Amino acid sequence: MRVQICAVGRLRSGPERILTDDYLERFARTGRSLSLGPATEHEVEDKKNMGMAAEAQLLSRVIPANAFIVVMDERGSVHSSPEFADHLRRWRDAGHQDVAFVIGGADGIDPALRARAGHAISFGRMVWPHMLVRVMLAEQLYRATTILAGGPYHRT
């Protein structure tokens, strides 16, 4: 199952870019034997500042057809790392070719796009900048593959 990270905003060079790239490379290596990955990032920018609806249109263009959509949203479910790994396993085993994790802009995700999602995940009740959400998502993808592979990275 391919993983798409569809995000509003550009992740420029710097510590967040380095961390995201590192965890996504680890995810690709570890996930290969589990039929998970690789992960591809799709970045969109609403240069005219037209708001959430315009961002949703841009995001919709980069979400693969028939992808299982997961929005990263403060109203979503909070999962432990093993629960997140189990969700990835179940989506893969259900035959989804692609899962698209959607990260919105400063105002969040347009309700119409949120309604298309099969699942919503929150990294807690606090709001996080898109740059950090990307790092945390990349790390959790890697952690999930190590959990599913029985590796030592995740300690319970």
Image (spheres, grey):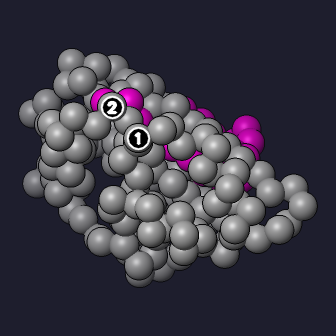
Tell me if 129 is positioned left or right of 3 in this view: right
Tell me if 27 is positioned left or right of 73 in this view: left
Which mark is on residue 13? none
Q: Which residue is mark 2?
A: 97
Label 2 sits on what residue type? Answer: Gln
Q: Is residue 15 magenta?
A: yes
Label 1 sits on what residue type? Answer: Asn
x and y percentages locating residue 149 in the rendered image: 14, 30
The residue at the point 17 percent across, 40 percent down is 94
x and y percentages locating residue 24 in the rendered image: 45, 32
Quadrant of the drawing holding the N terminus: top left
Whether residues under marks 1 and 2 lie with C-beta atoms below 8 angstroms apart, the answer is yes
Q: Which residues are magenta?
A: 1-21
In the image shown, does 47 or 116 lie closer to the viewer? Answer: 116
Q: Is residue 2 above or below residue 70?
A: above
In the image shown, does 98 or 74 lie closer to the viewer? Answer: 98
Residue 6 makes an appearance in the image: yes
The residue at the point 85 percent across, 66 percent down is 49
x and y percentages locating residue 84 in the rendered image: 24, 54
Cα–Cα gap, marks 1 and 2: 8 Å
Check the image and name the residue furthest to the right. 48
Q: Is residue 6 above or below residue 151?
A: below
Residue 38 found in image quarter: top left
Residue 154 makes an appearance in the image: no
